[in-house]
Amino acid sequence: MSDQSDPAVAPEPDSEPDVPVSDRIVTVPNALSVLRLLLIPVFIWLLLVEEADGWAFAILMFSGFSDWLDGKLARLLGQSSRIGALLDPAADRLYIVVIPITFGLRDFVPWWLIGVIIARDVLLFATGPILRTRGLFALPVLYIGKAATFALMSAFPWLLAGQLDSVVGTICYPIGWAFLIWGVALYVWSFVLYWWQTILVVRAMPPVAARSRGEMT
């Protein structure tokens, strides 16, 4: 899962710079991203209405695997696309918001922790308009943000499996919380670093309007 799903964060440059980016819509990676999006309401229904935790767990596992797979296939098949660059992070961001809320409704995790995760994204999104006043649209990727997202998305399946009233649940529950604590800590720290980057940009670069007036004189 890439940190390009963070608001106001630039996508990480591809490790294979020669992979072309096309305007194609119908591709295998895009189909996987759309499927992940379509599974979100199914996940909500299974977890909150049916309380079918096993099937909800299966969706989380499939989502995580397909998120990794679509990036690999995009490079292997030469199917990187502009719409895919939007669909994949959109799915990531929705899962990051939906899963904690559903877990909170089932009393799996405390609401204050859910508030921290959601507030971080909302406040980070606020850097976008500030950056645009300086002629920028996104900040460089921070690998700590990638690690935070990975830890959070790893925590959710473990926590769900931890609800089992068995030895498996007893083992999975503390592992899930370990991932969650590290994920939230890194999530908050990456938020601080992104905002610090934004402050440095504001200090170093004049507003676009001021630069335009300077060029006209």
Image (cartoon, rainbow, N blue to C red):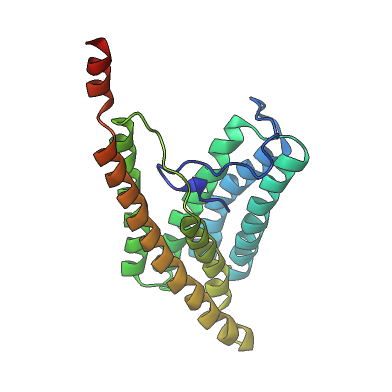
Residue 170 lies left or right of residue 97; in this view the side is: right
Q: Which residue is nearer to you in this view: 97 or 152?
A: 152
- Residue 115: which quarter of the image? bottom left
Identify which residue, 180 or 139, lies in the foreground.
139
- Residue 150 locus on image (x, y percent): 54, 61
In which quarter of the view is residue 15 placed?
A: top right
Q: Residue furthest right?
A: 77
In this orientation, which residue lies closer to the viewer: 64 or 189? 189
66 displayed left or right of 201? right
Quadrant of res 81: top right
Viewer-proximal residue among 23 and 199: 199
User: Is residue 198 among the parts visible in the rendering?
Assistant: yes
On-image quarter of the C terminus? top left
Q: Residue at x 58, y 41 (%)?
A: 13
Residue 48, x across and y down, in percent: 48, 63
Please, is residue 195 above or below residue 161 in the view? Answer: above
Whole-percent x, y for residue 159 in the image: 52, 74
Q: At which x and y percent is residue 14?
A: 63, 42
Above or below: residue 44 compared with residue 179: above
Task: Tell me if residue 72 comes above or below residue 24 in the rendering.
Answer: below
Looking at the image, which residue sits at the far top?
Answer: 216
**In the rendered view, does 66 fall on the left or right side of 140?**
right
Residue at (54% x, 79% y) in the render: 175
Q: Is residue 148 left or right of residue 121?
A: right
Q: Can residue 165 be seen in this snapshot? A: no
Residue drawn at x 77%, y 38% is 77
Callout count: 0
**Where 98 falls versus 15 (above or below)?**
below
